[in-house]
Image (cartoon, helix red, strand yellow):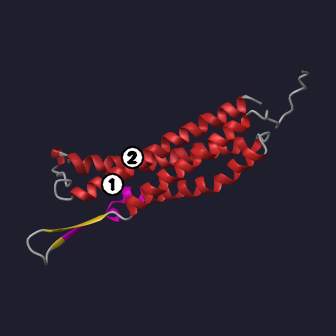
Amino acid sequence: MKAGPLQLGVAPPENRGIAILDFFLRLIAIVGTLASAIAMATTNQTLPIFSQFIRFKAKFNDLPSFTFFVVASSIVSAYLILSLAFSILHIVKANLVNTRVLLLFLDTAAMGLLMAGSSAATAIVQLAHNGNNKVNWFAICQQYNSFCKRVSGSLIGSYAGVVLLILLILLSGVALSRR
């Protein structure tokens, strides 16, 4: 078998398996990020304090970090949905390199945005669970138990999305190194 010269912008057909794995990882990441955004955006709990007439309500948009988390997760979910077209294109034509480089850069930016949103929300969740005695911030999760459980659960989906985006970045690097 005679090997021809390598051409710039052309990848070997063995990258088709990588493209199929890329497609499925994107689908799983969409589920994780979209579910975490929806779970956080629909989180609220009302707590009666002294009677049925006096109530305190905790909502996600009371805290700017949670709002940033929802926006960041939604943007990354939308990007992942749009990037499915490129992923399908890579399955059909395994020899495309320029779009793989584009996805590599955009996946890295999406991972950074999702990590920033997740980290901001994690700091608030940690404060809600443990409080801070030095500045007299009390833990609120003893009172708002279901609110805290739901917010913590949405963070798990988001961090799963971060891990999947890291895997997608590594997968793109492997596909590009095979050209």
Does the magenta run of residues contain 95? no
Residue sitting at x 79%, y 33%: 12
Image position, residue 102 (x, y; %): 70, 45
> Quick one: quadrant of the C terminus?
top right
Label 2 to label 1, Cα distance in Å? 9 Å
Does the magenta run of residues contain 68? yes
Q: Which mark is residue 151?
A: 1
Name the side, left or right, on which 34 lies relative to 132. Answer: right
Name the side, left or right, on which 126 lies relative to 82. Answer: left
Label 1 SS: helix
Image position, residue 124 (x, y; %): 31, 51
Residue sitting at x 69%, y 37%: 17
Judging depth in this view, the residue of 102 and 15 nearest the camera is: 15
Residue sitting at x 15%, y 45%: 133
Q: Which residue is mark 2?
A: 156
- Where does the magenta region start and end? 56-69
